[in-house]
Amino acid sequence: MKSLKNVLSSALILSILLTVAITGCDSSDNSGEEVGVELIEAESEPPSKIRLFFKVDLGEENQFTTLEPSAFEIYEDGSQISRLESQADIQREPGDFLYSSVLMLDLSGSILNNADLPRLKEAATTFIERTMPVEDEELYGTREMSVYWFDGEQSIHPLVDFTAERDMLISGIESIDEDISSDVSTNLNGAVIQGLSVMNNRLQEIREDSSGSTAGSMVLFTDGTDQAGYVSTDQAMDSVRSAASEHSIFTIGLGGEIDQEVLESFGKDGFELAEDSLELNDSFLAVAKRLEAESNSFYVLEYCSPKRSGQHSLELRATYEDKFGSFETQFSAEGFSGGCSVD
């Protein structure tokens, strides 16, 4: 699928992407009684296909719930569009959506020089097994992961590049030994900033090289605080605050030498504390569950518009039990024609 930039004139680009108004959940006014729906991207393709990439928040209690296509209603200019006639459907095949994760591990001296390393490797392996599907599973090809590590050096270190292959990731974890680093310090703040940069660059690369939609997350583990001092905690927090809504950040802290308040701030989408290395496996599993729920909260919906000219409003409504949420945007139907189909 081509984006508007490749399909329509520059004037039409402005008309379809202009004025995205979110009208979904406002938890401060409705106490979480409505569905949060956020539009991330809207695109169009001849002859008349509309593609919507969005995120749905059903609340903490329903974070593992995946909505069916019947839960969504499409309105153009205030009138509901028939799902049957528009062929509206959720796209979940590889190529439609790719969720990318960065696993960032603290391998400074305090980890490498004691008994915590084998347990960290075991926990990281469990995390990969829980979040990365294998080739014969339905979600294979819709998720990928890379592994990086940091110590006291100024730059983070790649261990495994982005891949959909679970075995490659596990082999990378197994290759870690006590000789991997000779720097006992910890560049935690730098790891936060650089890890987010890796994730941002990867998502941008996917968008440029494919027609699919993408979102991502970083999972960061540490057993301490920043000691290297290359960048400040405030600078790292600025990177966290400026992360887009489709970028999630989870943190895991080990032991009593961490700054829990800082790690909770870094982990804007989830923080887990392991009191000792015996709890690491449970902490990584808890984050794996959160990441799984996060990746399942994104939807790609395609439908064929009956409009053939002019500017139009588009509203997508999502319902779950007695809850409701929606977003609105605008699109141009100039140049639209018949013959549209949703694969």
Image (cartoon, grey):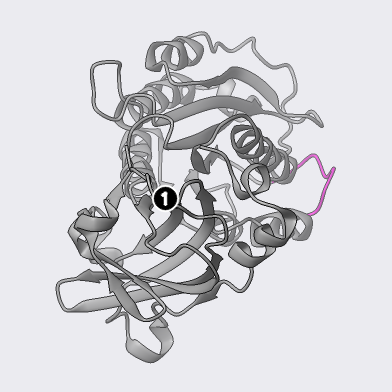
Please state the horizontal and vertical placement of residue 334, each as a whole percent of the image: 57, 61
Crowd tier of the residue under label 1, counting other residues whose Cα lies within 10 Å: few below 14, some 14–19, many 20 or above? many
Please state the horizontal and vertical placement of residue 42, each as a whole percent of the image: 52, 57
**In the rendered structure, which amino acid carries the disc numbered 1?**
Glu
Q: Nearer the viewer, residue 51 or 170?
A: 51
Q: Residue at the spot x=58%, y=47% of the render?
A: 257
Q: Main secondary structure of the magenta part?
A: loop
Instruction: Report if residue 248 is visible in the image.
Output: no
Q: Nearer the viewer, residue 14 or 167?
A: 14
**Res. 112 image quadrant:** top right
Q: Residue at the spot x=64%, y=9% of the render?
A: 179
Identify the residue position indicated by label 1 in the image. 272
Query: Is 179 within the magenta?
Result: no
Please state the horizontal and vertical placement of residue 49, each as a whole percent of the image: 43, 50
Q: Please tell me whether mark 1 sits on a helix, a strand or a loop.
A: strand
Instruction: Report if residue 29 is visible in the image.
Output: yes
Q: Nearer the viewer, residue 273 or 53?
A: 53
- Magenta-tinted stretch: 226-232
Query: Is 229 within the magenta?
Result: yes
